[in-house]
Amino acid sequence: MSERRIETTTSRTAAWTCVSRAASSLESDSHYRSDDHIALLLVPTSLKLLLHIPLIRRFFSQVIAPKGVYEYTIARTRYIDSIFKQILVEGFDQILIFGAGFDTRALRFRTETGAARIFELDVPITQKAKLGQYEKRGLSIPANVRFISIDFDKESLSEKLEEAWFSKDRRSLFVLEGLLMYLKPESVDGTFKVIERFAGEGSEVVFDYVRASVLRGAGSYYGQREIVKSVSKAGERWYFGIEEGELGQFLKKYGLRVCEHKDAQELERMYFTDVSGENVGRINATHCLVRAVKSEE
């Protein structure tokens, strides 16, 4: 499902997202603030102290980070948070977070969870690092949360879900955040086939993807050059993208239909537009966010 590097080294992408969320939780500007206060507890103490300094946060978000990636991470976090909370209100039975990394929603929304079960799926080394931080920080794990570690090169995703008692045909939410672009096309296909097999009617999938043209080096989206360079420098690579206008066709193969499709412009209108209608932050335009539902239609 991914390159062997993440089987032996904690995911750099997961670490980056955690630091970005930690920094965002300290922002005074409401457009830049997200609610992941637990992420701040997971970063090293020295870094946490630095992130409390506004000038350091600005240096991190505007100089170290590729153009618009900090803003995109904030928008993506807030968007998926809103869906996560909504489906809990609607009484979904279970939630599966693929490549969970340092995702903290199971803890942040524990009071809203009710009877829903939450499953976090990840490679052993990243999952172990996260659980180690939870223990170190004295963070208790809700009883309804189940962690599934998997070696994607050797173990079956379907079998791992069955072993963890993830129920088939129940109304479920599947979260694939910051994941698909790092998978090869055949792995993406296999993942969505598993979702199709396990998802009950009315289940939802939320994910982000990169535009296929970016993989070909075409296009000139805001922040494209910087983020491609950053991914390569991190020793990682994007393998999967979706062509413009082909999202619906892609999802239809797995019994899914598009509910929402958010590109950078739409996300900027949602999260980075002030009361006068002025844009206060630009989002890296290589990515889009999708909300899809399983339907017999």
Image (cartoon, grey):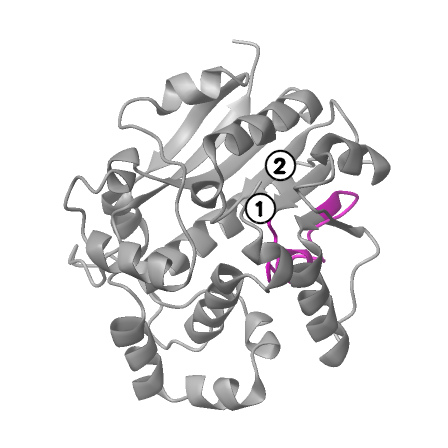
Q: Residue at x 55, y 76 (%)?
A: 40
Q: Amino acid at mark 2?
A: Leu
Circle nearer the viewer, 2 or 1: 2
Asked whether the beta carbons under mark 2 and mark 1 sit within 8 Å of each other, the answer is: yes
Tell me, for residue 103, which label it has, or none: none
Q: Please state the horizontal and vertical placement of residue 188, each as a whole percent of the image.
A: 52, 32
Q: Amino acid at mark 1?
A: Phe
Q: Please state the horizontal and vertical placement of residue 74, each as a whole percent of the image.
A: 40, 60
What is the secondary structure assignment of the residue under circle 2? Answer: strand
Identify whether 195 is placed above or below 153: above
108 left or right, relative to 16: right
Q: Please state the horizontal and vertical placement of residue 18, each as a whole percent of the image.
A: 51, 67
Image quarter of residue 169: top right
Identify whether 159 is placed above or below 57: above
Tell me, for residue 173, which label it has, or none: 2
137 left or right, relative to 52: right
Q: Report whether residue 261 is seen.
A: yes
Residue 9 is inside the magenta segment = no
Choose between 215 and 48: the one closer to the eye.
215
Q: Report whether residue 107 is seen.
A: no
128 left or right, relative to 17: right
Residue 112 is inside the magenta segment = yes
Q: Name the magenta segment's main secondary structure.
A: loop
Mark before the other along the chain sequence, 2 or 1: 1
| Range of residues picked out in magenta | 99-119
Q: Please state the horizontal and vertical placement of residue 293, each as a whole percent of the image.
A: 53, 25
Choose between 265 and 230: the one closer to the eye.
230
Q: Residue at x 39, y 20 (%)?
A: 248
Q: Residues within 10 Å of mark 2 (few under 14, many from 20)?
A: many
What whole-number distance in Å separates the C-alpha atoms at marks 2 and 1?
A: 8 Å
Residue at mark 1: 84
267 left or right, relative to 238: left
